Image (cartoon, rainbow, N blue to C red):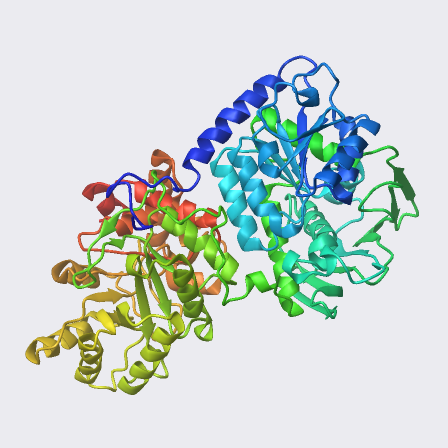
Amino acid sequence: MSPLTTPADATAPSSAPAASSAAASSAAASSASGRLAEPGAAARWAVLGAGTIARKFVSQLPSSGGVLAAVGSTDEGRAAELAAFAVEQGAAPAGDEPGAGGADVSASGTDVARVRTGTYADVLADPTIDAVYVATVHTAHARLVLDAVAAGKAVLCEKPLTPNAGTTMAVADEARQAGATLVEAVMYRFHPQTRALLELVRDGAIGELVHVDAAFSFAASDREGRLFDVDTAGGGILDVGGYPVSLARAVVGAARGRAFAEPLAVTAKGTLGPTGVDEWTLAQLDFGDGVTAAVRCGVRVDDTNIATITGSFGSIVLTDPWFGDDAELTVRTVDGETRTLSFPGAQPYGLEAAATIAALRDGTGEAAEISLDDSVGTARVLDQWRAAIGLRYPFEREDVDIPTVTGRPLAVSPDAPMVYGEIAGVGKKVSRLVMGVDNQQDLAHASSIFDHFVSQGGNTFDTGWLYGDGEMEARLGRWIANRGIRDDVVVITKGAHTPHCDPESLTRQLLESLDRQGTDHADIYMMHRDNTDVPVGEFVDVLDEHRRAGRIRVYGGSNWTPARVDEANEYARANGRAEFSVLSNHFGLAEAYDVPWAGCEHVTDPESKQWLEQRQIPLLPWSSQARGFFTGRARPDDLTDAELVRCYYSDDNFERLRRAEQLGAEHGVAATAIALAYVLHQPFPTFPLFGPRTISEARSSMRGLSVSLSDEQVAWLDLR
């Protein structure tokens, strides 16, 4: 069965993402919540992994009110040692508790001191386990987290949640769709010292924030083990660099009244050791408005490991910001006051366990201290940090087979929202939304975004010879090959962009594009620009030559005027050539008064709309949501975005925005979804291009697929 089979075509395959997992997770979570609602009920935890960090967690688990009921490990001896340690620390369940000592527990394994031990699968199959702490090597996190989610457990996963932002984004989305509880175990974020720091910054105790300086570095005695192994994502950035980055994002966010802030730029220098991992590195984060951060980390260099927050009125210094064993926070200000706050006895590992159970009990699924959006954002900065010093792990390379995050075959979800249309000559159905291939930073990120698009029924991708100097279409081709779905997807390829817009360049770029993508044909080929100095027949002749050779199924123009398309088709009919089958110009609810780039063309004016309706040529509109005009960014008094002002600001467009917001409120969707629905409900065929940077953005845009508009509503939105 094709991996792109849709519910309308056939019963969805058993590998459809998240459907069964969500049901299992929801049922198990309800059972766990009910059990935890009993008076005096202690949360029953399992730990996956039996290393040093797991021992630290177990030692503080009793402070959360929870107990360690099971240990999963690939090493039975180490699991037994951790189980015995739990008894010593008072973290094991009482002997008369259900499941203690292995009684009434379905999982197989070895009973050690009232704590069940076994394989990861054994532990996750235990129905008495409420929550799981994942403490394995970084590269094992994603699969174990999703296995635990599928088993209906709340999950606390040691940082980093996964080795890169693309995978972290996909794991977070899977957990949310399953209704599961998932928290990244960045333990210092749960310490009362961190809470006090953020409150001080938020309240302006040191005036306007200027700079954050934070370090977490240590000197390992030798270059052995997971820390120095590129195959397990070793090195300082992923092991400890997330702490100062997370702190900087949280502090800047607090200063701006938000949970976190994203840096506008990341620059870095560092040293890669003989095993290939980063051994010492420092990065500069620019948050805009004069706010910066300097962060350092390493596994071969000792540092002060303090954090200093500097403002216009003074500074805050944390001498033990990460573990908080001797937590002390000192505030010094220009009025001469020095305050020192101490936080004795805090147990951050216990606090993160308690926060996870609280998120399970109240149904939020995420901890207030560190949301999944926060985790994804930190992962994105760590990716940028690694890229700046040239560190990419072997399993992330552009030429490797990155599997789906679940490990299951790619398939379409039974509740996929996608709808389809036909473009004559393509020979396949075409999803009405087209994924733009120009916003994916690396293969891991692209794989997560593309996999999600396919799971929602999408099958059409738009790329171009120019994008990323060829890197983007090569990435798309690698992903298609990894999934084995070339015959199931529709690939739009564009070339002949200014200044190389001539028949000879078209041919050269087409062949290069096919080679980069690892394919022998483009389902749809479009010239990315027009060159009116070249007789239109010369372009039609070369395009039709490639069509007859099988390199192109159908062709058309992007940023061609209606008059020029008519001229091309008149030539084609007169000379026995195939006509232009598609057009890709700027089109959307907002009328364009200018275009973002030279050589672009729009068809938002009344005459062009009439031409499209008469010709019925399929339109693949770009910037159908007006480059953010309908997201809330545009306001008549906000002139900061010169391009937005130049292209779209007018009384009529602001009235269109007001009507989209009004209709969106009636439908329970954002104005952007209404803008997309407007494009989909035209009296001519449309296949809007969109370029989400995250899975969340993709989901938001796809909500427009479910909005049904009447002809009267379409006309009303367009002020007709």
Left or right: residue 523 versus residue 518 is left
Left or right: residue 144 versus residue 97 is left
In which image quadrant can residue 674 be found? top left
Say if 278 sits above or below 259 in the image.
below
Furthest-left residue in this view: 574
Q: Is residue 718 visible?
A: no
In which image quadrant can residue 117 be found? top right
Say if 660 sits above or below 524 in the image.
above
Looking at the image, which residue is at 81% across and 25% down? 90
Where residue 416 appears, as percent x and y from the top left, is: 34, 42
Looking at the image, which residue is at 61% across and 48% down? 140
Where residue 319 appears, as percent x and y from the top left, is: 87, 48
Looking at the image, which residue is at 84% across and 54% down? 305
Q: Is residue 135 visible?
A: yes
Say if 96 sits above or below 474 in the image.
above
Where residue 65 appears, as percent x and y from the top left, is: 74, 24
In which image quadrant can residue 312 be found? bottom right
Where residue 231 appears, as percent x and y from the top left, is: 64, 60
Looking at the image, which residue is at 66% across and 49% down? 160
110 or 476, nearer to the observer: 110
89 or 590, nearer to the observer: 89
